[in-house]
Amino acid sequence: MTQQQPIAVLGGGSFGTAIANLLAENGQQVLQWMRDPEQAAAMRLERENPRYLKGIKIHPGVQPVTDLAATVAQAELIFVALPSSALRSVLQPLAAQLAGKSLVSLTKGIEAQSFKLMSQIIEEVVPDAHIGVLSGPNLAREVAEHALTATVIASSDEALCVRVQDVLHGPRFRVYASQDRFGVELGGALKNVYAIIAGMAVALGMGENTKSMLITRALAEMTRFAVKLGANPMTFLGLAGVGDLIVTCSSAKSRNYQVGFALGQGLTLEDAVTRLGEVAEGVNTLKVLKARAEALQVYMPLVAGLHAILFEGRTLTQVIELLMHAEAKTDVDFISSADF
């Protein structure tokens, strides 16, 4: 694969733009595809993505484009940064063209009807593609502003991991590899739910002890669920698990945290999402996660509690009271002592 061949990034949102810039800064030619011709024209003219990353200059090596078929035809390595609700419909018509290419999902979400993760949808649409997942504590604006950041590329395809490390790795962005694609991706999807709770807690003036308790019990809860589905529990002690959970639950830059904060201020869910102006994947994930946890009989009191707040009229104070009375007595219950 030659240096001159472009890399494609599908999606014109904040994280897609940050990754496109990072690739270009590392000397790659990047085709960033987006659905909206006006957005692409504005980005070409102003060299900025004003809607999603205002103030960040788009690198000259990034070419905003709108012809999806032409973009896919030119690239062998494709980063997929589409909203979870659009991913299948965008990729499906191009399945034949995508065959044999390397597709790396950047989207942290779960498909509502099927409970499929994004890489599983890609695998379904393009069965013979080389598939990977990029996930970790990676707030888009901080990546774009060159804050020291680390991430995880997860794939059973070692050559794909090496390729992604090669094109993304730089002095301010470190890329680790993992073979647990399912665990890494599940961690990225699940933590969004808990960020909503964390944002609410801060808006309601709850203390640091409370926030720490929520984050730690969230880690136990999401790991318990992931292990039930076959993920490696150790994955959740790394960047894609506890690392991503900490940043998403602690930062006002996190979209899901912002939605939770707005809810804590008394806004309705609809108004909170409108104020954000972007997709907050945690709201979508919550609905499917609660149903799946109940079907699998996995104890997830925070998920059930947040669902009760958003859709059943409960308050966060009531949910935390229930947690205090009903939580399991063991601290770490998702790894058997026999495993050590």
Image (cartoon, rainbow, N blue to C red):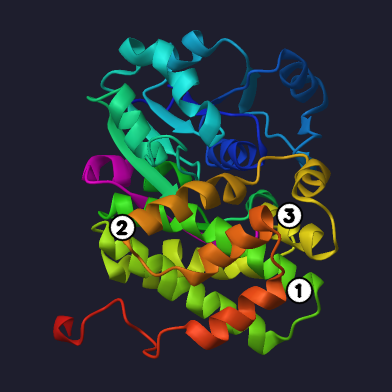
Residue mark closest to the camera, 2 vs 3: 2
Residue 88 x/y as whole percent: 44, 24
Q: Which of the two discs, 1 and 3, labels the residue nearer the N terminus?
A: 1
* Numbered badge on residue 240: none
- Distance of mark 2 from mark 1, alpha carbons? 31 Å
Q: Which residue is mark 2?
A: 296
Whether residue 259 is situated above or below residue 305 in the rendered picture: above
Q: CA distance from mark 2 to mark 3?
A: 28 Å
Q: Please indicate whether residue 167 sits to the left or right of residue 202 in the image.
A: left
Which mark is first along the chain, 1 or 2? 1
Q: Is residue 208 visible?
A: yes
Determine whether the residue tagged by mark 2 lies in a helix, strand or loop: helix
Relative to residue 300, is residue 207 drawn left or right?
right
Q: Which residue is mark 3?
A: 259
Classify mark 3: helix, strand or loop: helix
Amino acid type for the residue under numbered disc 3: Val
Q: Residue at x 62, y 61 (%)?
A: 308
Magenta region: which residues?
147-163
Q: Residues within 10 Å of mark 3 (few under 14, many from 20)?
A: many
Residue drawn at x 65%, y 66% as measured from the top left = 197
Amino acid at dot 2 = Leu
Residue picked out by circle 1: 202
